[in-house]
Image (cartoon, rainbow, N blue to C red):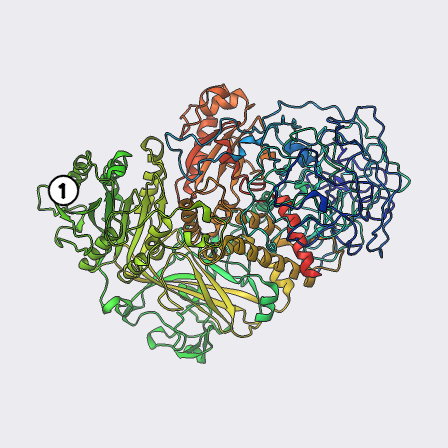
Amino acid sequence: MNVNQQPHMASPYGQPQPGYQGYPQPGYGGGHVPSGYPAQYAPYNGPGSAYQQGPPQGYSPYASFPSKTLATNLVSDLSSPLDLGMRGPPTSGAPPVSGAQNYSQFGQGETQNGPPPMGAPPQRPPVSQTYTPGAVNLPGPQPPYGQQFGAPPVSMQQMTNQMASMQVGSTAPSPAGPSYAHPFVSQAAAPPTFPPASTAHSQPPPTEAVAQAPLQSYYRTMPPAQQPFPNAVPPFSSTGPTQPQAPPPVSPQSFPQAPPVSQPPFSTAQVPPGPTQLYRGPLPSTQPSFPRPPLPTSQPSAFPAGPPPTSTPSQLPGVMQPQLPVSQPSPYHSGPPPTSTGFPPQVGPPPRPPLAGMQGPPMASQGPSMASQGPPMTSQGPPMASQGPPMAQANHILPTQPGMPPGPINTSLSGPPPQPGMQGYPQQNGAFGQVRGPQPGYTGPYPGQPNYGAPPAAPALAPAAPKRLDPDSIPSPIQVIEDDKANKGSEPFTTGVRGQAPPLVTTKFQVKDQGNASPRYIRCTAYNIPCNSDMAKQSQVPLAAVINPLAPLPLVETPPYLLDHGESGPIRCNRCKAYMCPYMQFIEGGRRFQCGFCSCVTEVPPHYFQHLDHTGKRVDCYDRPELSMGSYEFTATVDYCKNNKFPQPPAFIFLIDVSYNAVKNGMVGIVCQELKTLLDYLPRENPDVESNIRVGFVTYNKVLHFYNVKASLAQPQMMVVSDVADMFVPLLDGFLVSVSESRVVIESLLDQIPEMFADTRETETVFGPVIQAGLEALKAADCAGKLFVFHSSLPIAEAPGKLKNREDKKLVGSDKEKSLFQPQVSFYNTLAKECVAQGCCVDLFLFPNQYVDVATLGVVPISTGGSIYKYTYFQAPSDQERFLNDLRRDVQKQMGFDAVMRVRTSTGIRATDFFGSFYMSNTTDVELAGLDCDKTVTVEFRHDDKLSEETGALMQCAVLYTSCSGQRRLRIHNMAVNCCSQLADLYRNCETDTIINFFAKYAYRSVLSSPTKNVRDSLMNQCAQILACYRKNCASPSSAGQLILPECMKLLPVYLNCMLKSDVLQPGADVSLDDRAYLRQLVSTMDVAESHVFFYPRLLPLQKLDVESMTLPVSVRDSEERLSRGGVYLLENGLNIFLWVGVNAQQELLQNIFGTPAFSQIDPSMTSLPALDNPFSKRLREIIESVRAQRSRYMKLMVVKQEDKLELIFKHFLVEDKSNNGGASYVDFLCHMHKEIRQLLS
């Protein structure tokens, strides 16, 4: 499949030139594209000596960046014919450039500002350079390239369109299965310039000048008095994938925007299992002078079959796509964006450099290699191979024949005209076409340049830039998700096959338990693990399982059976204590069984004896869940209980902050009002029976108020404890009561609390003594339970656990940054340990107006299996709905108390590391004061011996807990995976979403002990090693210019990049330390479905919604380029829902959703949609409710109008684009990854 769309193509599918053979490319490229030229040009070997590379006039980079005088010698270090044009990251200075080079044919003062006149004859390079396969460095002067400049690309659409230059094709399967690769392409002459095709531009939007303004964090609502957003926000100027975009006007402080990725219409067909898919480099820029005829449509598609897009954004009129500069200094060095590659210069303050730490090697999970090690290429892209040897070079792109003169583009085609600074580097084998020389004064194409594509500030001449990679030609998350739905969404997933990878978390499927736990309970990073530690170390693929022991199941699936084996309890192995499960082998006629975990032989108790059938199985095998199913429960005997006595039913204690802030913002009144009805919905196992849970109430500010609500009282009694240094509970009888018995007294209390504290002037609060009070009450009642703490401010009153404000933005990005994530005092660690011992779980609801030190206050919730909810700048009218829904779900959800979890494994591997909300007093037992249906525990495994391919590897997760009815139970989940001696088998059975979940938890824990820079570096390095190992050991030999990705890991780069630029690891200036600590703790317990949507939000185009159908429209990729000015989109990430409204949205659509046809009359402050009586409104509200129901947190709706100030918050979640905090775009990151992989391979 060929993804190389030439810049001048007008037709939607990129007509090939005669002599091409084209393949439809519905999957990623979205159109039919050519697959080869008749004759091969030799590749380009470096820029001509007369071509000067330098910054445009008037640009002044940071003083600390390499000066432009350093740019010398672009070609002197070309390493090999297969070199991609990538170099290692220099620590300072720009790579040398060869010879003096004029970067423009115009003088410094004669910048030509606009496209060349229509009649301007295109210039040809005087000489084409040949590059023979054995050629290496060609220092010395190179023939000069004629260069004609047109208007620089100024809009993101234009930049993206200049990237349409990658070819993909299929090759023969390798032993490892399908994979992606890009072959190298040879290229010779510099591209000619073409007169522009006539284009109709849409209204030019303002530039990104506002990107620098601090904005309110998207995790909270806006404070009433603060207006942190500038009023002008760059509007989107694309009307969808097919509409050209206008150049924005120049304005000070405009930063180029990352070229967004274009999204082809989606296809649901499958990738053929056998053939490898190779991404070819972009086509050479030498354009023939004739238009291409349409491609034949009968060619087999090398990518998943599906309809090609009706028009590809990469062929918009008047737009050409720049390619990433290739061997710039490390893309991770911060610095202003390169102007000399044809990216427009910036004006105004330079962008904030990225956090330290962006310099490390990228992770192996990145996608196609982007040229970063070798000579420059204008339109080449390393291939991505999806596992397998290339076929005969059918899909390697060959440059145009020497006989084809590069003539002017046919202006009847709507292809892009040349832009000044956009041509001039011919192409070199296999890169995604980045320019190899450094831009003087710049460090790299990656984080320092927040946004490629903003307009230039002053008429300054940018030298030619190569074309960039077409975003449609790199792996699309949406394509993979839709293919998985089509392949695996229709049939039930049966768990009886060992080592079978489940459907993705984004696919709806039904599970049939046939001996392994459902993927809703356990998901593994790999379902085929290496037989020995050397192989595991070589691959660097993490071996881990994400376990959600109490995961909720859909109604169509049966919950685990509860088994009672009487007083003797569950049957277990004598040696390793594993519980009876399908992996136990019965021998000697059924009188003994051999443990599948440790191979020990154990006697079968007489009451459990059963005969065996002719296959050696017990005849009652399918009547006993523990012998035939992966998940089940046992009732525990008294031996499994504390102090050898059965537990009391748990208790809930509500502790309410009644200081000035909490009363003023309305929190106290809302909580008290809600509890009156919520207490009827306490968790219970049988909906017809009253809950056994008892409740108690405390209010506090600097002192604590306990309430006696015994049923015999006419009015509640308040007791005040002012000695907070030595906390005790002043009453035993009457504090914890049954709701049904004391309802009248409880309601009277809840009515009185808001009145009692309505006029309070007390602003100081305590926090440590509040948790101590709840803990002491549970101890006195001798039960486990949960504390619901509603807290508003930093606890500065004199008391144990007193804190001070330590928020210091200057530490962000420094080596001391890790201290901001660590607790301020050790008091809370000790308190958490005591809570776990009692089974006291703490849930914390925060309502801060300023810094409250979430990193410290969160220690107790995070150690006890609790949750933290945060409502910054809480305002009752807009935030009440979100808070109450969170509170209702938190009170009602199923959970276990006083839990202990142990993971046992078969001989050869062992659990070595654990991530989540829990406490560990030894190396094996995970202790959870509370365990609810949203919490996961992630376990990492390591080898301690060799494994065998015959037996595979087994794991058993056993959780001992007290149910909400007070019954002690054991829940067992079993999982068997395959073992392999070939790396190809490992790479064929990995699950990317689970790997990213594990990497996120690993990284977010690492920030406690390492600078964020080092954390990002180590992650990128590990992922580069994963992909380099695959390339070296599993892919067939191919050009070094190819980046080859395993089929099941082709999304590792895009997801990893989303994680690396998340607010915890790379915060923007507007993200508070509390938000980062909150997110860090939130992600630590996320399951795979929630971490997936958190890092790669779902973006639904509502203008394509079919109200008659129950299916949702296919999502689009998270890039501004995918947004149509005439559309309305719904974006959700598990914490927020945004409804983005395009400025040109149809009146009928607006009338159906908002009840007004006018864009200007939409109220952006609304948090719920009006209930209108039309099918579209009803269906949209149903969708929003169903999306909310899938997530563990209630998502507040924010309406974002295009060009409104809130749009900057929304754009933060368009994760394939460059981010304001310096995070790279998907395309840029892919480039960086390939450089790292090639360095590892060389």
Taking the image as shown, residue 155 lies to the left or right of residue 502, namely right
Q: Is residue 759 visible?
A: yes
Give the quadrant of residue 593.
Answer: bottom left
Q: In this image, 85 relative to 857: left or right?
A: right
**Three-letter code, disc 1:** Val
The residue lying toward the viewer, choosing from 738 and 260, is 260
Residue 269 seen by the camera: no
Q: Residue at x 76, y 57 (%)?
A: 1038
Looking at this rendering, what residue extends furthest in the right direction? 403
Callout 1: SS: helix
The C terminus lies in which quarter of the figure? bottom right
- In x, y percent, where is residue 337? 64, 40
The x, y position of residue 1237, in whole percent, is 66, 56
Residue at image position (38%, 33%) is 223
Q: Is residue 1068 above or below residue 208?
A: below
| Vertical side of 1138 occupied by 961: above or below | below
Q: Position of residue 7 (x, y in %)?
A: 75, 35
Count of picture labels: 1
Query: What residue is pinned by disc 1?
Result: 745
Give the quadrant of residue 988: bottom right
Position of the N terminus by quadrant: top right
Q: Name the foreground residue: 999 vs 626.
A: 999
Please name the residue shown 13% across and 53% down the image: 730
Query: Where is 173 relative to 702, above or below?
Result: below
**Residue 172 rendering spot, x and y as whole percentages:** 74, 55
Near mark 1 (Cα within 10 A), the count class, few <14, some 14-19 or many ≥20, is: many
